[in-house]
Image (cartoon, coloured by chain):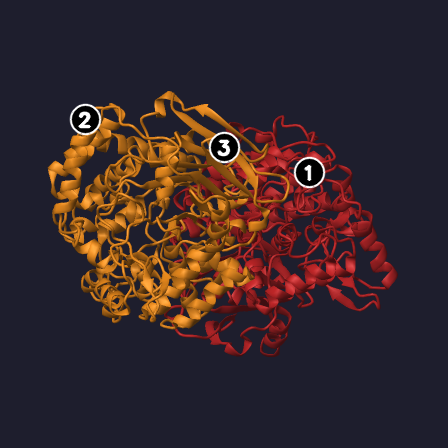
Chain colours: A red, B orange
Amino acid sequence: MVKVLRVDMTGQKVTEEELDGKFEKLGGRGLTSMLVAKEVDPLCHPLGPNNKLVFAPGMVTGTAAPSSGRIAVGGKSPLTGGIKESNAGTPFSQSLARSGYKAVIVEGMPEKDGLWCLEINKDGANLKDVSNLKGKSTGDTVKSLRKSYDNYDISIIGPTGESKMASAGICFNDPEYRASRYSGRGGLGAVMGSKKLKAIVVEKKISKVVPKNEDLFKIGQKKFVESLRNHGVTKPGGTLNSYGTAALINVLSQAGGLPVRNFSEGVFKGADKTSGETIAEEVKKRGGKGMMGHSCSPGCVIQCSNVWPKKDGTEHVSCLEYESDWSLGANLEVDDLDEIAEMIDICNEIGIDTIEAGVTLGVAMEAGLAKFGDGQGAINLLKEIEKNTALGRILGNGASFTGKAYGVVRVPTVKKQGMPAYEPRAVKGIGTTYITSTMGADHTAGYTIAPEILSVGGESDPLSTKDKIELSKDFQVTTAFIDSTGYCLFTTFALLDDSSGMEGMLETINGMLNTEYSIDDVGKLGEEIMKVEREFNEKAGITKYHDRPPEFMRYEKLPPHNNTFDIPDDELDKVWG
Amino acid sequence: MVKVLRVDMTGQKVTEEELDGKFEKLGGRGLTSMLVAKEVDPLCHPLGPNNKLVFAPGMVTGTAAPSSGRIAVGGKSPLTGGIKESNAGTPFSQSLARSGYKAVIVEGMPEKDGLWCLEINKDGANLKDVSNLKGKSTGDTVKSLRKSYDNYDISIIGPTGESKMASAGICFNDPEYRASRYSGRGGLGAVMGSKKLKAIVVEKKISKVVPKNEDLFKIGQKKFVESLRNHGVTKPGGTLNSYGTAALINVLSQAGGLPVRNFSEGVFKGADKTSGETIAEEVKKRGGKGMMGHSCSPGCVIQCSNVWPKKDGTEHVSCLEYESDWSLGANLEVDDLDEIAEMIDICNEIGIDTIEAGVTLGVAMEAGLAKFGDGQGAINLLKEIEKNTALGRILGNGASFTGKAYGVVRVPTVKKQGMPAYEPRAVKGIGTTYITSTMGADHTAGYTIAPEILSVGGESDPLSTKDKIELSKDFQVTTAFIDSTGYCLFTTFALLDDSSGMEGMLETINGMLNTEYSIDDVGKLGEEIMKVEREFNEKAGITKYHDRPPEFMRYEKLPPHNNTFDIPDDELDKVWG
């Protein structure tokens, strides 16, 4: 019997139940999306009593499989109005997997005031009153919870989640208990806040996660680890490990595809000053030991995370990765890493998605609330969110909302979610992914940057419209599968270039679940998941007419290539048509 | 040849052109919707360069037909994201009809800063710089314009339109040049503001509007006038003329269908204090001569408007009608007519829709921004809009927006437009209209209140779900026709009960246009118009899943009848299915 935990916040009851048999081979996104589609009315108010929040570790999470510490969180998104899965790498995922629960389903809504913590340990699962944590930052919350829950991993929301802002994420601890790992996108922190659930704590190592076929699992694991250790991008001392994900800043700027000044240019003059290379150099110079090549969760081979130090070498924030570096840097024309780090720190502490925050500030600058390039002005705007002022509530509800508040036309969102760090007009496959994903604009939904920019998994001219429909679809369905396994998406850099790695990955899954997935099944299962997500969205009122770029990208040419987004609507319809 | 005026704000050019032949028998909503559907990309940003704003008087406007001074304004709504037609009664409509133009189409967007006024007179049409009017209230704007345009009628936006708030309406003068008549709903004032068009002025009586068959027209006109003069609701000294539309306050409260405290109760304790009867009595007592039975435009038989006097008998505001009285009164639990009048005055002066404003304040009170019943608190919130603060921008963008800003679940909107003064759970036909209209929640889109509450045009139990689909559809298609004629919707009270009135109405149309419309054609033409509107909406991403009540009305029971809105989704789909 596969168990799930159901948390009824209305009745304050926690019960264990058997997972529907047809879902028991799923994990991560596959499981959250299937459960949300089954149990949540697509027309419910995302912050009302009928939305649900589902936490699910991946298929192999909790085992020794490499880089497999992802947790998926699903629900109806207050940001997009559609189905949402947002995943994070954190030891919490591994501990939840080892608790024996394939998923935690949080539902209902307490009528009384208060805040609760779901505690999961060897003795069972209970809701505890944590009203004392009201309004506390994520850092303070983790500190406070660790007094009672030393040997636990932790999932929490910040004050923005409590006050139900649509850019609030769900925060998890990293291996050193920093409140720094985020299921950031889509506002699921607000859903958790609407249910007055401030935290979930899970005791470590409650039990072991045992593959059904340990031999096969181990064979696969070995092949997969080897593959990761051999690929230039993922290996120890490779690109991601040495420079972090921000290694992409220079690459994208050189390609003319790094969105600058609220998506009005593709090259950033400050790229060098904010690049991964500069980060690595500066971390070294400031003497931050162990601050590069940091991992989000135990057992990661890639170790792409980092910790940014202050000038005196003491810790400032983790992590300064590509998306945050860009959203709060290039996108605002801010080229000072310490200012960017300060902004990331504020976002982490108040509990909001750094991508949405940066895209929002870009729109706010367009509206004249601060000047492009003014890092301190941007910091001050984030502090408005912290103070929960009216302006803060505008900004905390995201880029699309802020654009509407101020009548801004250049708003880089799809399905109301802010676009990540790749310009659709200069990298058209990723643009197609943003536009046609079930999740709103999301690079991780189908990361065609691999062939378009990195020559990984083939090559595809980023400026060309050719074959982008098929490319994006392939990546999207594969990703839906990967997001279900618990493996980090970055493992696919190795998988795409090395069939033995792919074989190994599948063997770990088959060993784990006693399945017989072939490479073809990856696409099939992925497509099944996306079909269910699309059906949910359709019933939530999201149609093919929402699979469209923001209008300005159709008529504004992006320098330096002076391209519009020119894949026609009827082509976009073919992704799922 | 039927002429229209095209105003290109990008190129600052005004040109006269021939109207597409297939539209030349249309007017009002029929014409604005057909032109918007033909010329506007449903996916365009409503505040971007590709939206258009269309002004069109009705089919018979400008003639001596009774109560026919309505002007329709159409475009893509920044509030709903769908097609919008919003009409008002004003001499402006009659003067525009007499200018010889069937419609004015405003398109494009100036790149440079500034504000313009479109001047239409005997010598032609031109754009004039009126940058000096920047930020001016509607009252001051009319005053200022009248210095140069004494013998003109005037259409303007207030400061909220200039700053592109989604509840900004388009304001017109009344016969005494008060800035008080509004195409309020759907944020078309923001579209006008995005185009930097502050005003349109039209010289009076440029030419005559001559029916093609004057004899037939006159026969019809006589019958129609007689019918209006005989019906209890519409006749001189009848309900509307004596008490204004606010005569409905007591009626709806007694029926348990007057939304109170942000749609959480159906009976208002303060109904008597804010009723039409009390208004009439108080106006008389304060000595306001000619302040009841006021007309919005010359030639009206019904004369339902009023002017509310201050305690000293001097003028406070026009007009204190049912919807505003309710939205800023009962809906906020405010029962002081002077406070309500003050709020209406602020809305009129800053240029926002009083319905949207009141529904927004209800949601804001739910969010804790002021207390229910606190009239001064509500006034202060409206002043935030006037001051264009961050809070003001939230409120100025409407009820749905405000609900999102503060994470409120009880938000009484459909397609993001605030619900008018009838509770869907207690009056289910009008609820069906709110839900399935192309316009978002709109009582004027299919006013089933006639049979449900007023026993006009038959009787239908308001609490019953029976036959509400057919009832609402019939009213909606008939209304689409009436909205095209230029006739005030209130004329239908007489038409519904008197076949001779209906005959007369059709004869005026047929006399005017040389058509042969029968009573059956009314429905057919109305259905055609709505089909085009629905197609536009579909392409804008508005589906049957948007033809739904707000979720809370499905599970919260409304006192005193303790009903939910219980017409099932698949029944709602049958309205247009």
Rendered location of residue B512, percent (x, y): 26, 28
Q: Is the residue marked by circle 2 packed among few (<14), some (14-19), or many (20+) residues within 10 Å? A: some
Judged from this view, the residue extending furthest toward the right is: A285
Badge 1 element: helix
The quadrant in which the N terminus of chain A is found is bottom left
- Please say if A110 is above or below A281: below
| Residue at the disc numbered 2 | B215
Q: Amino acid at mark 2?
A: Asp
Measure the C-alpha gap from mark 3 to mark 2.
33 Å
Numbered-mark total: 3
Residue closer to the observer: A506 or A334: A334
| Residue at the disc numbered 1 | A450
- Please say if B546 is above or below A307: above
| Residue at the disc numbered 3 | B125
Q: Nearer the viewer, mark 2 or mark 1?
A: 2
Q: Residue at x 26, y 24 (%)?
A: B212
Check the residue under mark 2 and report the chain it is in: B
